[in-house]
Image: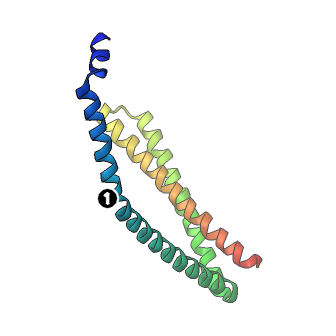
Amino acid sequence: MHEVITELSSIRWWISVVLAGILINLLSTYLKPQLDKAASKLSLKGKIKLKSMREAETLYLNKLRSDKDFRVLETFEELRFRARSTHMLLMGVFILSMVNLIELNLKERMFFLGFAGATFFISYLFYEKAARKISKIRKATEQ
């Protein structure tokens, strides 16, 4: 403890702190305009992308509203996503049950548990895609 207090009271420590503060201030003064430019470019790209995504969704919703055949096809695609989701979920449950029923060493068990986890995750992704699609279909038919 005495060594820390001695070091903090030395002139060398105070000079290094002042020099580090000046260096950080100069560095931040130099980098701030460049960071601001990069952030504004990134923000502009994001705004452009968001605008194009909104326009694409508006076109999609208008097509859903106006074309009944397209709406039916999109509904069937949503059902396919739900079926795939259910299939992957059942496959994951089957793999988990087999891992518990069959005698496996640790590496094999970890491999199949990872594979089951991957199938559950893929099932979730398919279900999320189906939910988004049906949400857009409902949004188009309500308006």
- Residue 89 x, y percent position in the rendering: 52, 52
Numbered-mark total: 1
Q: Which residue is mark 1?
A: 30
Depth check, front residue: 77 or 134: 134
Q: Which image quarter: residue 12? A: top left
Query: Which residue corresponds to the image point at 39% horizontal and 34% vertical from the top-left?
Result: 102
Direction right: furthest residue: 142
Within 10 Å of disc 1 (Cα), the crowding (few <14, some 14-19, many 20+) is few
- Location of residue 139 in the rendering, given as x and y in whole percent from the top left corner: 71, 73
Residue 75 in percent (x, y) is at 63, 75
The residue nearer to you, when weighing 119 against 30, is 30
Q: Is residue 127 left or right of residue 44?
A: right
Going by the numbered disc 1, the residue's amino acid type is Tyr
Q: Nearer the viewer, residue 124 or 53?
A: 53
Mark 1: secondary structure: helix
> Residue at coordinates 31% horizontally, 59% vertically from top-left?
30
Instruction: Locate residue 11, reporting x and y percent.
Output: 25, 26
